[in-house]
């Protein structure tokens, strides 16, 4: 069925270090892969997304890479800051129905 | 402010009861999605509507139902409530199928 595996479930890094979160999806027909950030007590918000016609996309300190053959994509955050602390969700778009399936989330803690 | 409005923000009720959660999408958005977020769980997709029609169904229990009205607002009805239904229920909207989702602040349901 429709599923996306996200790892790790928790990640703790020192300020200034890099953080990487990985997701593997099941729908080989999917062509849209967004990442959402949810701060404590807040709503999820889109931070970056990638479509299947590119392998990498970058926006300042965050980047996403996509490997369609292996059906996995990753979020990379460089020079982490305390305000990056949040839960990050990967997702993919189901091609047939057009809804987003989310991973279980990664709780990132950035220690000053 | 995402432009998506959810009411009520908090709701406490007893087992066996029925509640209705309401969502007003962003102006112009035709798609409305409902997600359930339980403690330490990701965003579980429940149901999607597009311009008044049900578009996709996820892991929505038979005790739950939803609809989207002509003015595009949506309601999620939860009946015969159980303790395990306690969760944060998010509504999201988008202007197209497969576009960015804009989430509301959520409705926190507590079943005692």
Image (cartoon, coloured by chain):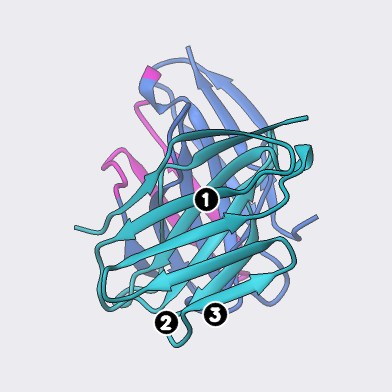
Chain colours: A cyan, B blue
Q: Which mark is residue A20?
A: 1
Q: Is residue B74 magenta?
A: yes
Instruction: Name which residue lies at 47% across and 42% down.
Output: A105
Disc number for residue A52:
2
Q: Is residue B8 above or below residue B65?
A: above
Q: Position of residue B20 (x, y in %)?
A: 52, 39
Q: Split into 4 quadrants, where in the image is the N terminus of chain B?
A: bottom right
Q: Between residues B100 and A26, which one lies in front from this camera angle?
A: A26
- Looking at the image, can residue B53 be seen? no
Name the outermost residue toward the top. Answer: B112
Q: Are labels 1 and 2 assigned to the same chain?
A: yes
Q: Is residue B26 left or right of residue B53?
A: right
Using the image, name the chain to which the residue with label 2 belongs: A
Nearest to the eye among marks 3 and 2: give it.
2
From the viewer's perspective, is residue B9 above or below residue A61? above
Q: Residues within 10 Å of mark 2 (few under 14, many from 20)?
A: some
Real-space Cα distance between discs 1 and 2?
A: 20 Å
Q: Residue at x 45, y 75 (%)?
A: A32
Chain identifier of the residue bearing label 3 in the image: B
The residue beneath circle 3 is B96
Q: Chain of mark 1?
A: A
Q: CA distance from mark 3 to mark 2?
A: 18 Å
Q: Quadrant of residue A62?
A: bottom right
Q: Are marks 3 and 2 in contact (CB under 8 Å)?
A: no
Q: Residues within 10 Å of mark 3 (few under 14, many from 20)?
A: some
| Number of numbered discs overlaid on the protein picture | 3
Whether residue A42 is visible = yes
Residue B52 lies in the magenta stretch: no
The image position of residue A5, as x and y in percent, is 32, 49
Q: Which residues are magenta?
A: B59-83
**Which element is circle 2 on?**
loop
């Amino acid at each position: 069925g429709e599923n996306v595996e996200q790892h790790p479930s928790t990640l703790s890094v020192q300020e200034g270090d890099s953080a990487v979160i990985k997701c593997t999806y099941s729908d080989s027909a999917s062509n849209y892969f967004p990442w959402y950030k949810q701060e404590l007590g807040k709503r999820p918000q889109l931070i970056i997304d990638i479509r299947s016609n590119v392998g990498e996309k970058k926006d300042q300190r965050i980047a996403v890479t996509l490997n369609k053959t292996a059906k996995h994509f990753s979020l990379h955050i460089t020079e982490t800051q305390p305000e990056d602390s949040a839960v990050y969700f990967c997702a993919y778009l189901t091609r047939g129905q057009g809804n987003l399936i989310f991973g279980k989330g990664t709780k990132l803690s950035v220690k000053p | 402010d995402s432009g998506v409005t959810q009411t009520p923000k908090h709701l406490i009720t007893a087992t066996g009861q029925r509640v209705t959660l309401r969502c007003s999408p962003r102006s112009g958005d035709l798609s409305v999605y409902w997600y359930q977020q339980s403690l330490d769980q990701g965003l579980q997709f429940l149901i999607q509507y597009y311009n008044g029609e049900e578009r996709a169904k996820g892991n929505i229990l038979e005790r739950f139902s939803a609809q989207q009205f002509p003015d595009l607002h949506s309601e999620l009805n939860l009946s015969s409530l159980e303790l395990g239904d306690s969760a944060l229920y998010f509504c999201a909207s988008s202007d197209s199928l497969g576009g960015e989702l804009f989430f509301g602040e959520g409705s926190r349901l507590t079943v005692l």
